[in-house]
Amino acid sequence: MYIIHNKTKNTTTHYEGSWPGGLLEKQLDKGDRVIVISLYSNTIKVPHKLEYNGIEEWEWEDFPLLK
């Protein structure tokens, strides 16, 4: 399960299944501030934008949820 917290809209969504990439990219492209907690991998995922040859893409940096 993924717990998606959108700080901009002050919402929290629970999402089960595969990585919700399309949903998250839409929110990020609108300028929303989002973090994801993955209960599958016990990580907190923080987005950042990278540029490859003029193409911008969202990448995710993982931090351990529990030590």
Image (cartoon, rainbow, N blue to C red):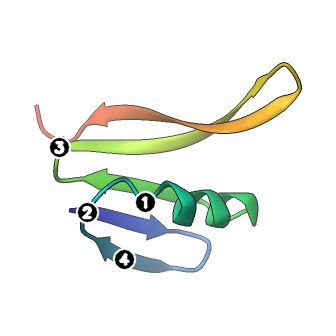
Residue located 10% across and 31% down the image: 67
For label 2, count other residues whose C-alpha is less than 10 Å away and answer few (under 14), some (14-19) or many (20+). Answer: few
Tell me the mark number nearer the camera, choosing from 2 and 3: 2
- Judged by depth in the image, the label closer to the viewer, 1 or 4, is 1
The residue located at (58%, 79%) in the rendering is 9
| Label 1 Cα crowd, 10 Å radius (few <14 / some 14-19 / many 20+) | few
Q: Residue at x 78, y 35 (%)?
A: 56
Question: Can you tell which of label 4 and label 2 is closer to the viewer?
Answer: 2
Label annotation for residue 17? 2
Q: Are marks 2 and 3 in contact (CB under 8 Å)?
A: no
Q: Nearer the viewer, mark 1 or mark 3?
A: 1
Residue 31: horizontal and vertical position, in percent?
A: 74, 62
Sequence-wise, the earlier of marks 2 and 3 is: 2
Label 4 – label 3 distance at C-alpha: 17 Å
How far separated are the C-alphas under marks 1 and 2?
Answer: 8 Å
Amino acid type at mark 3: Asn
Q: Mark 4 or mark 3: which comes first in sequence? A: 4
Mark 1 or 4, nearer chain start: 4
Q: Which residue is mark 1?
A: 20
Rendered view: 57 above or below 36: above
Q: Quadrant of residue 7?
A: bottom right
Describe residue 40's horizontal placement relative to residue 24 as left or right: left
The residue singled out by tag 3 in the image is 42
Say if mark 1 contacts mark 3, CB within 8 Å: no
Residue holding disc 4:
13
